[in-house]
Structures are given as C-alpha cells and as structure tokens.
Amino acid sequence: MVDLYPNNAVLEMFTRFVFSYYLVDFVLRFKFQTISLLDMQHYLSLPFSKKKLFNFPVISSIFSFFNVLAFLLLLPFFFVHVIQEYAVVESIVWFCYIYGGIMTVNFLSLGVKFIFNKKALLAILLFTAVLVLLTLENRGIIALSKGYFWLINTAMHHPWMVVFPILLVFVSYRFTYQLLLKNRYNEALSSKKTTSNKIITFQFLEKYGNLGHLIMLELKFILRNKKTRTMLFTGIFFLLYGLMFYGNEIVNIYSFKIIFVGLFMCSGFITNIGQIALSGYSSHFDGLMTLALPIKTLFRVKYIIYALAMILSYILTLPYYFLDAKIPFINLTLLVYGVGIFPYVFLYVANFKYQPFDITQNKSFDMSGFNVRNFIPLIPVLLIPFCVHGICYLLGNVLFTYYILLGLGILGIATNSYWLGVIERKFNEQKHKLAEGFRSKE
C-alpha cells in the first residue's frame, strides 16, 4: 500500500478506504445478512421478559459472518502497521472507531431491512443516497472519507473521544431493538400467510395464446408476492451501478471494468429473480408436476421473461449516453451476450437447488433459500468475458472481445430450442430430488 500511495500516509488511505467500505458493506448486509428472528408472536404470551426475547436476535447478529470477516481483516493491519507506529492508547482508539463503524452498520442494516418490509420507498431512497455518496466520493466531488480520517486522527490525540463510536454503536443497537419491540404485534413478525387484495392483470398477453397466458401467470407470480417484489426492486439498483464506474474521463472501451459494469446493469433482474427459477415453486412443486404442462414450455416462459427484463434494463441505461456516446453501443453488445447466455445458466443451475424458498412468508428478516451461494451461476457468465478479454489482450486487439461476445450471444439465441432441451432433460433427471428437497423443512 505504501507503493500505491507514496505521497500519503498508509493509515490515512486505509481509513478512507474503510469509510467507503462501510457504504458497500451496508448494501451487502441488507441483501445477504439474516437475523435469528424466531416467530416472535408464538412467544409473546409466555411468562418471560419480552425485552430478553427481542434482545436475543439483535445481540446474536454481532457474531454474523460480516462482522467476523471484518474483524479478521482488520487484525493484521492493526498489529503489522498501526500498533507498530502509534502508541497503544492511540491504536486502541483507532480500532474502536473502525470496528465501531462496522458494528453500527450491522445494527442499522437490520433496522432498515425491517423498515423495507413496511415502507419500501424509504429503503429505496436510502439506497439511492448511499449510491450517490459512493459516486461523489469516487469522483472526488466530495471527500467525506477525508473528514472521517480527520475525526479519527483527532480522536487518537484525544483518547476521551473514544466514547463517540461506543455511543454510536449503542444508539444503533437501541434503534433496531426498539423497532422490533414496538412492532412486536405486527404481522411482519408472524409467519401467518396473508393474501393480497391487489389485482394485477396483463390481459393483453392473452392474445398470444397459451404461451402468453403462461407469461401473464409468471408475471403475476413475481408481482403479487412480497419476496419476489423485493428481489425485483433491489435489482433496479444495478441500473445505477454505472455511476460508480463511469468517471469524468472518456470511457476506455479496452478496460474490462466497462464490460463488467455493463453486464451487471443489464442483468440486475435475472441476477435476483433467476435465483429462484424453480425453488420459488417449492410450496406447490408437487402440484406443478401433475399439470399437463410440458416443462420445456415453462422454461421457455421464464427465458422470455428474463430476456425481456434484460432488454428493459438496457433501455433504462440509455441515459448513460450523456456521459459517453459509446456506452449504449457497448452495453448493446453485452445485452446480446447476456440474453444468449445468462438465462440458460440460471435455469440449468436451478435443477440443483433443493432448498425450499417459501414466497408466502413475509417475515422481516426471512430470506431463507436465498444467500451468497446462489450467486455461483455468476462465476461462469463473468468468467467467459474475462477470459475472452484476456486472450484478446494478449493477442494485441481487445476490441475483438466485443465481437466474440456478440457472436456468443447471437449463437445462444439462435440455438434457444437446443439449450432449453438440455435444461429439460436435466430437470427430468433431477425432479424427484427437487421434490424431496422442497418437501423438507429448512
């Protein structure tokens, strides 16, 4: 790190990096971190303290994967650099501020996740604010991280200021705890199934016959359930991903990061909803198998929806034209690649996901059946462009990367029936294992 920043103190650069990490960590926790929230309403009538009941899930979040990982990553830097160059008291103050920020993000993310189930618009606005801050920080328009380092540096010279991060952690903890306690009789803490009175229709699809009718049913399936709607809305944030990568300078079409961000923006929807291509049917999978519906037709319906969603995502990214006129053309190439590759990978991998995913459960922190492992399908679809880019770079013409990806996408679209047949055959091999897994308790 000294070599990367020869004109800056290592501690300052690391601390400023951690500040940006807080913002990214907040979004990742909201997406992946779960809380041990039992079906609280079953315990409210029992003769023991309600405070202890709601303290347990909040306190237990301290030992989450994100907190342990951050602790293990901080320790080497703390012992190798900080404590070697600063007094023990100053080093402890620095660590308390850095890890105190991690714990504050931990509790706040849980509270916001609860609010998201009740007032999704507030959470969307909050996420937008986080993304805007990251963008402004990345482009050097504002320097909040520099101010954060100044605060910690000041505290290191005035050790009594260590009370501030401790107080902030306590306040964020009380915020989440009080939020749960205040809503202890709210249906969000209950596992009871609720029905929606909202009527969502896509009657115009009926004119396309049986396939159009099935597409209409699949769209209703996505929009009428809270979990799938949550996945849909969070996928929208990928459209703003480019703000973090497209700088003020001219877009470098030879950089792999342009390919990376283009793929993510065009595939935000499928990255989320594609995770439950089959497990979303877990509660009525046995009934689905008794229908006179060719499974290949079901996969074709999902492919069409995924492809249309990616096309819509691409259209919504067209305003990036005003940052650089090349962006829409680059993303168009990546869209064709994505439509020709992404849906097949997610649909094929769905045949190996035996964990049930109950879309009818509306618990605040319940995202069971949907975790980091579900993003394994992204490895091959991102590895292919990376390898193609690397080969073209070694051959001296990175521009051919786009031609090759475009060709792969067109080939995938042209052989649609073949790949859906491959997925169908794998499904027929796996359907009994899927049925057994979906019947099991988590």
Image: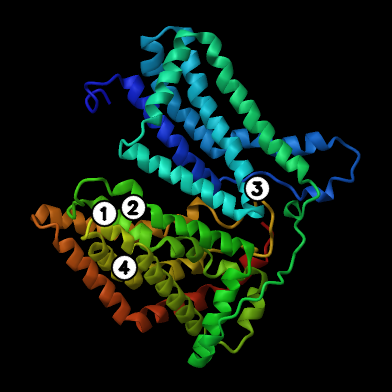
Q: Nearer the viewer, mark 1 or mark 4?
A: 1
Q: Residue sitting at 52 percent across and 38 percent down?
A: 66
| Residue type, label 4 | Leu
Tell me which label, 2 or 4, sits earlier in the chain.
2
Check contact, mark 2 vs mark 4: CB within 8 A. no
**Callout 4: helix, strand or loop?**
helix
Inspect this view and state whether residue 32 appears.
no
Give percent across and percent down for residue 35. Answer: 64, 44
Check contact, mark 4 vs mark 3: CB within 8 A. no
Q: Nearer the viewer, mark 2 or mark 4?
A: 2
Give the label on residue 341, or none. none
Q: What residue did someone put label 3 on?
A: 114
Which quadrant does the N terminus fall into?
top left
Q: What residue did someone put label 2 on?
A: 242
Q: What residue did someone put label 1 on?
A: 323
Question: Marks 1 and 4, how far apart in space?
Answer: 19 Å
Check contact, mark 1 vs mark 3: CB within 8 A. no
**Callout 1: helix, strand or loop?**
loop
**Callout 2: helix, strand or loop?**
helix
Q: Is the residue 367 above or below the residue 415 in the image?
A: above
Q: Nearer the viewer, mark 1 or mark 3?
A: 1
Tell me which label, 1 or 2, sits earlier in the chain.
2
Give percent across and percent down for residue 333. Answer: 25, 67
Q: Residue sitting at 49 percent across and 67 percent down?
A: 350
Local crowd size for mark 2, using a 10 Å CA cut-off: few (<14), some (14–19), many (≥20): some
Question: Marks 1 and 3, how far apart in space?
Answer: 36 Å
